[in-house]
Image: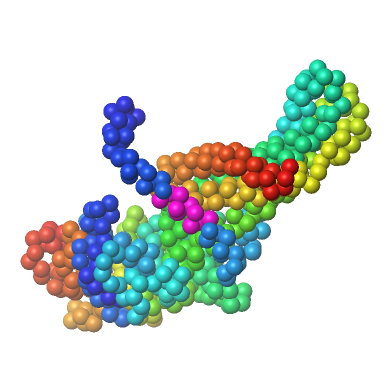
Amino acid sequence: MVFEDVFLAFDQKPLLNGISFRLPRGETKAIFGVAGSGKSTILKLALGLLKPDSGRILVLGHDVTEMAEEELFDLRRQIGMVFQESALFDSLTVRENVAFRLMEEGNISEDEVDRRVREVLSFVELERTIDMFPGSLSGGMRRRVAIARAIITHPEVILYDSPTGGLDPVTSTTIVELIIKQRDVSQTSALLVSHRLQDAFTMATHYFDQKANRMVPMAPNSRKDIPVTFMVLRDGKIIFDGDAQELAASRDEYIREYIS
Amino acid sequence: MAAGDILSRIEGISPSEFVKGKLLSVQEYALLSARSIANLFKRPIYANDMIQQADIIGFGSLPIVLAACFFTGAALALNSATTLSRFGAQAVIGQLVSIGIIRELGPVLAGLVVAGRNASGMASELGSMVVTEQIDAMRALGTDPLKKLVTPRVVSTTVMLFFLTILGDLMGLIGGGFVAAIILGLDAHEYWSNAWQTLVFSDVFMGLAKPIVFGFLVATIGCYYGLSTKGGTQGVGRATTEAVVASMILIIAVDVFVTRFLMIVLGS
């Protein structure tokens, strides 16, 4: 994914002021900034849900700024998104929510759909909720179902919009573990918007042990191998783009205050 | 809201901005309406959703449409009996009720009932989906919300209002017949004979063309206000109210133009 000099204003107030960054394949980039700094907007721009006022955005080799809505539908099938409040469809069961994209494609048998739904629900450890409605689930469970819905088609890129927002610390850790699991098992690229620095630092210092079926800390001298970078926004501009060690060593006053 | 707040809102909107805002709304509504029809010729066609909506809109509205038309037919017969008795012409109540219900009251009443019940339902459902990002999620999952949500509702409302009007017309005539036979003591056979024989092709055609127009208006307006919702739950409430008011007013206003147009076309 490449953002080149992207500008966007709402009601003549600039929100993004010349944003440029790259997301290489297999990397997870955590985006931070104060409320209203444009973090979620970057995710919506990447999906083509919004169009920038100027600039170029390349996703999987396609320029989404030039594509019409109908052309974007095909591209979006290769991108997964987990929304801030899960955005599950209230009138559909968990099974129907998770299988939504498969049902829309229409060329997959019921048995295959069922198999894949159960596979991703067991990945997020929620197979028992398959016939429940979103209204009956807790916040953390809804978030996990949203992750299952995003990953069922094995997308190449996943966009997470505050996946742990509003959750208690224990549930947040569960969600972070799932994100790490998805990163390490499928090697997907990801953009992660978060308000919790500790989530991103956890992702930068842990890996998923498939034998133990849980995340475990990486040895300090091996942490450079984990492809997690950090990006900090301020006043519509990127003031930091680098790894965890560079962030911790930054002498910028704003960044030091932000991470303290 | 304090008087000062109202004044500052009025002062803050220039006439040109107001007009531009309204023109933009009309443009967006026109685009939504056009695309809701155009989607019928593009895959995928959500037939299951159309059938589901037809059940909600058609069968769900049936009792209230039948009740409204029955009592309106009865009231029409009662009121017209008073006037006709002055001329000794009570026997033509059947013709009056028949023409009034078939040409005008049946389609308009059914349209207003469906507007109140279903335009509000569509606006609130789609509005809730907008404020909870479900519409964005649908677009992110590669599905066009207009194809999946709007077109099925437009098709179902247009088709079901057509049939609801037919049944409503029948109930209106039954209501008028009930009053004529039981309350006014007129000959029921004479009532029904007059009601049937007075109808000509233009009456029936007009009465069946109007619900198609009204059904399209109700669904497109309900969906437009729903998808344009802004401002959280308060916005959903506002969109719901505006959808009902707009669809009802438009039904009544468009009725005049459709009636005149059909009168010219049919030469009646």
Residue B161 visible (yes or no):
no
Dominant secondary structure of the residues highlighted in magenta in the image: helix
In the image: residue A3, left or right of residue A95: left
Residue B107 found in image quarter: top right
In the image: residue B236, left or right of residue A32: right
Residue A57: x and y in percent read 30, 72
Residue that appears at 34% across and 54% down:
A166
Instruction: Please determine whether, in this image, residue A240 is positioned above or below residue B203.
Output: below
Residue A245: x and y in percent read 15, 73
Instruction: Please determine whether, in this image, residue A193 is positioned above or below residue A79.
Output: above
Residue B238 visible (yes or no):
yes
In the image: residue B69, left or right of residue A162: right
Residue A144 found in image quarter: bottom left
Which quadrant holds the N terminus of chain A?
bottom left
Residue that appears at 37% across and 67% down:
A48
Residue A80 found in image quarter: bottom left
Span colored in magenta: B24-33
Instruction: Please determine whether, in this image, residue A169 is positioned above or below residue A29.
Output: above
Q: Magenta stretch containing residue B29, yes or no?
A: yes
Which quadrant holds the C terminus of chain A?
bottom left
Q: Magenta stretch containing residue B185, yes or no?
A: no
